[in-house]
Amino acid sequence: MQKKCTRCNQVKDLELFDRKKENKTDGRKSWCKQCSSKHSKTVWSAYKRDKDHEALSASPYKFLKHWLINVKKPNKRARHPVHPSLSIEDLMELWNTQQGKCAKTGITMTHLKGSGKVDTNVSVDRIDNNIKEYNKDNIQLVCYRYNLMKHEMDERLLAFWCKTILQHG
Ligand SMILES: [Zn+2]
């Protein structure tokens, strides 16, 4: 006996469908085993991803540590390498000194993973862009949006553009 899977629309042998007592017609599920397993894998990985994001969002420590581990990955051909001595403790010291506020805007920074690009999320800024490396003496914590706006610019140049825009109204 054969049956058509309502998920992939393929006609398959009945044994390729899991049993389901509630189904009075043939005692099998309407999705084939392959579709069922594919589906539960998708559901599981989405669940796991959500859990991971939740864990990383729990504290600035976890969030920043995740950043640090990522940028320190040796296989990444980073344009802006991280000095090997830069540690999570250095970043947390900055966080505490800045009291969780963006060094340039004073906005209270967030640490939300999995919500796309969040403007207020904490990000690590190289104060002097000419120094290509992230090292302890050249970094501050700023909002993601500030970092984007600054891009390759010098702080003073960014300030000039901001002022000019405001003055022009
Ligand atoms: Zn199927």
Image (spheres, grey):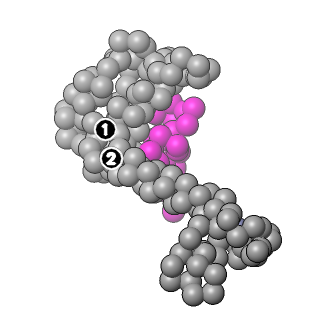
What's under tag 2, amino acid-wise?
Ala
The span picked out in magenta is: 144-169
13 part of magenta stretch = no
- Assign a secondary structure to mark 2: helix
Q: Which residue is nearer to you in this view: 66 or 2?
A: 2
Is label 1 or label 2 in front?
2
52 lies left or right of 74: left
Residue, x 41% and y 12% (percent of image)? 84
* Count of numbered tags: 2
Residue, x 39% and y 17% (percent of image)? 135
Check mark 2 vs ligand 1: CB closer than 8 Å? yes or no: no
Q: How far apart are the two marked residues, 1 and 2, measured between alpha carbons?
A: 7 Å
82 lies left or right of 23: left
Ligand 1 is located in which of the four quadrants?
bottom right
Residue 67, percent from left and from top:
42, 33
- Assign a secondary structure to mark 1: helix
> Residue 62 — which label?
1
158 part of magenta stretch = yes
What's under tag 1, amino acid-wise?
Lys
Estimate how packed mark 1 is, as few (under 14), some (14 to 19) or many (20 or more) residues with alpha carbons within 10 Å: some
Residue 42, percent from left and from top:
56, 57
Q: State the image quarter where residue 31 is shown.
A: bottom right
